[in-house]
Image (tube, rainbow, N blue to C red):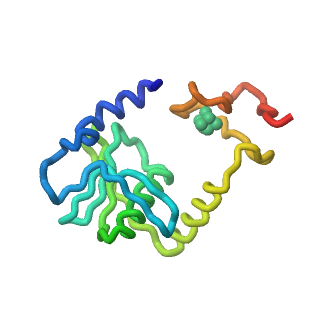
Amino acid sequence: MYQEEVQIAWTIAHESIDQKSYSSRKDILQWLDVYSEEWGIAGKIDLFFMREWKLVERKNKIERIYQWYKYQLWWQMICLEEMWYKVNHLEFYSMKDNKTHKVYKPSIDELYKFKELIKRYKSFDLLEKKWSQNTQKCLKCIYKELCDYYIWEVYPQLSLFE
Ligand code: SF4
């Protein structure tokens, strides 16, 4: 498997989680598969502290909390809650600078919008003619070396479907 520098750093940082060696405490769930039947989503949580009802996702270095970071925690929270775990706190932990970034729980309205987004995401089709890459995202994308649809700024938009 090919890994970019950023992914290698992530893999090293997550070694203790992959090996479930963060802690031997029984009240900390580590690297657990989770799913939600209602939402039709699945994933893996990083750390869940059952006594504090706290869900934590560790990242190598966090410079800002992007919306999709929040979605990642919301996604895990939805799965955990459907699995009858109570989740009250959501946090990111930036390992390099030892900083914690709290994320609020979504409101009903945000959950509704998130559900709509997931519906759109599930029905996405690469063959849709309307689809096009976002060059700014492609430039920063860690999968670009592997992606057939990678496009960079100075190129005109590819006409993929002609
Ligand atoms: S390089 Fe590929 S996977 Fe990455 S953002 Fe661009 S189109 Fe998406």
One can see residue 45 in this view: yes
The residue at the point 69 percent across, 39 percent down is 133
Picture quarter with ligand 1? top right
Residue 75: % across, % down:
44, 59
Left/right placement of residue 60 relative to residue 154 reads left
Q: Residue furthest left?
A: 25
Residue 62: % across, % down:
38, 42
One can see residue 138 in this view: no
Q: Nearer the viewer, residue 80 or 52?
A: 80
Residue 129, placed above or below residue 109 = above
Q: Nearer the viewer, residue 125 or 60?
A: 125
Give the position of the C terminus as an image quadrant: top right
- How many labels sit on residues? 0
- The quarter holding residue 12 reads top left
Q: Residue furthest front?
A: 37
Residue 15: % across, % down:
27, 35
Give the position of the N terminus as an image quadrant: top left
The residue at the point 18 percent across, 65 percent down is 51
- The quarter holding residue 121 reads bottom right
The residue at the point 46 percent across, 72 percent down is 107
Q: Nearer the viewer, residue 59 or 22?
A: 22
